Every structure is written in structure tokens, then in C-alpha cells.
Amino acid sequence: MRHYFTILSHEIRALLYSPSTYIAAVLFLVVMGFIFASILEVYSKAPQETPPAAIFFQLFMIPVLFMVPLLTMKCFAEERRLGTLETLLTTPVSTAEVVLGKFTAAYLFYMLLWASTLGFHYILQIYARDTRFLDAGPLIGGYLFIAVSGLLFVAIGVLASAVTRNQSVAAILSFTLLFGLIIGLRYASELTPLNHSVLSPLKTAVDSLQIASHVEDFTHGVVDTRQVFFYLTGATLALLFSILGVEAKILGS
Amino acid sequence: MACATACMAELPDITIEVSHLVKTYGPLTAVNDLSFAVKRGEIVGLLGPNGAGKSTTMRILTGYLPANSGSVRICGLPVASQPEATKRHIGYMPENNPLPEEMRVSEYLWFRGRLKEMPRARLRARIDEVLELCDLKRNRHRILGRLSKGNKQRVGIAEAILAEPAVIIMDEPTIGLDPHQIIIVRDLIASLRGRMSVIISSHILPEIEATCDRVLIINSGRIVAQGSPAELRHEIFGHTSYRLEMAGDRAGIAADLAALEPSLKVATVGDCGPDGFCAVTLQTDATADLGEKLLAALPARGYRVRSLSRTQPSLEDVFLAATRRSWDARLPDKKNPNGDNRPPLPKA
């Protein structure tokens, strides 16, 4: 793993030097700011049962569906198109080190973006002069969910980038995979054929993979190890497939 | 690596050993039973038409592509089973020399040096050294994407020699360069002679001829000829030609020439000018230079000679002849010594 940190620091440096990083960050903050402001508007009109932070994290899918493909599409597709992947893999580095390094850099950037939304809650607290608005419980739970689920989402983005040489194909592929995972599973659980008694194990499996209900659990302070395990194994699997994908693409080149 | 100079002493004499290498892409056979060896400090040129398997061979040597069968040993280590160990001995510059556009020259070299496991202190000094060697000192802080093609190419070469590997593999190092830059790159490669084994591929022939100790001509995945440029000329053509302008009665010339050297004969007689001088081409199988003998003998027998030159087939002719021959028939090898019943080349 001695090359892991070399690749990681190279990737982080590349992210920091690239203007697209800053454009993406600004867009992300604008979108999240509008969402947060509109949540507050709803709350100012009528009292609600859930804390605003819980609603804020319920809308995690908007940035995930758009930011993760944008963040990860470059990872391998661009390097493969330019041919720099070949020079990278002819040094004594293993494919696993390259995949992990790129994944970690993308994940750290994803987390940095989310961390910057902490500012919203801070600003709210300053202007409202009321500590009740800064409810630590849902915030900690929500950010924990973001950190854990981000592993899987970013890994899926890396996987999509690892199997193609075209950035837009990578972006569309990762959008589709994430859409299927987050929204598709929600519709799958509502399918009537699943209510048949024979398919009941499948039904429970699909029901427990509702990512929206995971957010709810996390923001209410319920950290279910089964859910954490799902994200961790999912991320590991996606990264393993990314390694295989990078190596298989070489065979066909 | 840090021990580069010390390790050189331990390295075997043969740094690259390829035997019976085969690589297919589906139905297409890119490399077909290729065998060769490269000695330490030798510069070898891989020559072949487009799609002959040059790049594929180089990629297999670097361990980037796996071969279907056959073996490659770099510094005595098999590439297939110990890829990470062999990659430490290789500096590789792929075709078109891809570089990350947004990095600066010194940053890129630093990143590559770290990937090649060079210790920081050594790397800092070595980067200065290679920048000096490749004449890039003035460009060290420039962004790679904004460099000229020639400078990019030199960055590629600097990167390949950075870790002082025993083997350097360069795929078309002078492609797209202007003649002035080609000379610079060629001198740079020539300066590595004796220290590192270098394999360069090209289809620019004068360049190979100027730089390489040995040439391997590849066509449709197999070696059709190999040796130094001079050996190749002799192997492919087997004769030497002399071109002279002479006047005089040529009726008895065949006998006169045979007396001089049994295999010497008139090949062609060109146009004769109004002054009686004709351009004549003579051919001989003898390897020794007959120029002086001809100059002495011909006037003595009553011919007037105005000019004499020994014409050598260029590497271009050798290349064309060798690749044409390989389309027609396979080179005679040990299994099949007489050329009459050579099986045809498999169609790619």
C-alpha cells in the first residue's frame, strides 16, 4: 500500500487545481442553500413535528444523484481516454492501489462538500439566536448517514467510470445505477407481485433496502448495524468490481 | 531505485529475453511466436509497418498487457509472475506520450518518481539531473498541457529515464517532431548507450539507422529480419552494387570483370551521353570493397572511368524487401531449412 498515499495526494491535488471542482462546489452549495431556505420557509409558516435537519437530510438524493456522477466520472474514463492510465499501471503500482486512491480522493471531496453545509445550521443558529434550532441529535445522525452511505454512492460512481472510456457514459451509467438504488428500490417495494407469500423473503429484503427509511432511522438516532453493513459491503463490492473492470478493460484494449 | 548504479553490476548480461511470445485479440494474431534478446546497454530498434505488432510487443514487455503464451524476462525475472518486480526495471514511454495536462513539469516528475519508489532526497537531485539532461531546465515550472510537442516528448523521455531503469522502452519517441527536435531526441537516446538497454519502435527508418545497434524488422507479428543495419543489407540483398560512368568499347567487359572478381558482372547499362560516357551498374556478391581494384583495373584495360561510387541499399530498401518477403513466404527457420515448401503466412 506504499503507493496509496502517493496516488491519493496526486488525486487531491488534481481536484484542488481543477476549476470544475470549484464550479461543482458552488453549484452544490447554491442548490443545498435553496433547499435549506425553502425548508425554513415552510417551518416559519406552520409548526412541524420533525426537526428541520431531518427534512434536510431526507433530500440527500438530489445532490447524490447529480454530484456523485459529476465527481467520479473523470476517475478512470478520462485517464483511459488520455492514455495516462497506461503510464500509471506500468509503474510498480497495483490496480487496487489506484482504485482505492481515486475512490478515497472522491470520497473526501464528497464529504467536504457535505461538511460545508454545516455552515447553514450555524448561520441559522446565529440569526435565530435560539439554540433550539441547532438540534445536535438529528445533525450528528444525518451526517453519519451521509458519511456511511457516501462510501457506497461514491464507490458506484467509481465503478461506472472504471468500465468505460467515455466520461458522459460514465456519468449516465452512475446516475442510472444510483437512481435504481435510491428510487428504483422504493418503487420495487410497492410492486403487487411481491406481496405473494412465496416472495416474502424478497419483500423483506427490498423493504430493508429503502434508503429513504435509512435516513429517517439515522436522523432519529437509530444506527442499525445491518444498514451500516449494507453500505460497507456494497462499497467493498463496487470497488472490487472496479478493480476487475479496470483490469478487464486492459485485456480488451 | 537508489541502488541503480550498484544494481547494474548485478544485472545479467541479457536484460530482455523474449521467447515464443504470442498475443491474439480475438481472431487477430497481433504477435506471433516472437523471440529475441537484448543485451545490457544495447539500443534496439523495432521496425515494422502499422499494425505489425510493435506496440503490442512493447506493452507485453512492460507487463501492461498479458500474453497468450510465451515468456518475457526482464533482468532475469519473468514478467507474467512477478510484474511488480519487473516494472521497477522498466522506464516506459507509450505511443503519443500521454501526460496529465494540468500538472507542472517538475510536479509530474516528482509524482512519477514517487510512484517508482525513489526516496525523496534522491528524487530531488535526480529531477534536476534529468531536466538538465533533457534540456528542460527553463520549462520546469511550465504546465504540461501548454508545452510544445517537442518539449512534451522530452518530458516523456525524462520520465522514462528518471528512475535509472535497466530497460527503457519507447514507442515511437520521435513521432510528430520537427527535424531539429528529432536530432535532439536521437542524441538523447544515443547518450543512453552502454548504460541502459533501450528498445525504440519507429517506422521512420533513417532515425533507427542512426541510433540503433540492432534492428528487428517485424511484420504481422513475427520477426522477418534482424541484425545491424549493415548485416541486414547483406542478408536481404546479398550483393553490393557499384555505379560508374565509363566510356570505351564494352564488348569484352564481362570477361574483364570476371577476371577481377568472379562474381562481378554488369547489372544494368544506363543512358549514354553524347560524350560516350555511360552509366553502368555492377553487382557483386563479394563483401570486400572493390572500388580501388576497379579504379586501377578498368583504365588499364582501356576503359575511361569518370566516376565510381558504391551504392548501398538504404534501410528503407531493406525494410521494404523484408516486409514484402514476409508477405510472400515465411523466413527459413530451423524447422524448415529449404525455402521451397515454406508454408504461407497465416492471414491476419
Image: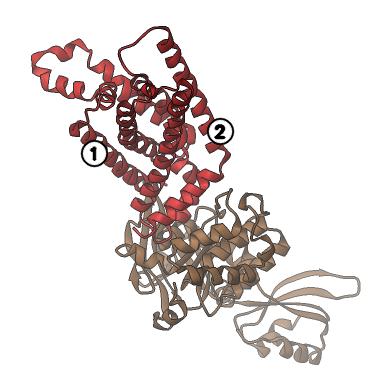
Chain colours: A red, B brown
Disc sitting over residue B19 in the figure: none
Q: Residue at x 69, y 85 (%)?
A: B257
Q: Earlier in the sequence, mark 1 or mark 2?
A: 2
**Residue at 17% across, 24% down:** A205
Horizontal and vertical percent for residue B18?
A: 39, 68
Chain of the residue that carries numbered disc 1 in the rendered image: A
Vertical placement of A213 versus B323: above or below?
A: above
Disc 1 and disc 2 in contact, CB within 8 angstroms: no
In this rendering, position of residue A245 left or right of residue A73? left
Q: How many labels were placed on the picture?
A: 2
Q: Nearer the viewer, residue B66 or B33?
A: B66
Q: Amino acid at mark 1?
A: Thr
Q: Compared with residue B288, is residue B109 higher up or lower down, i.e. above or below?
A: above
Query: Foreground: B30 or B271?
Result: B30
Viewer-side residue, A5 vs A74: A5
Q: Which residue is mark 1?
A: A233
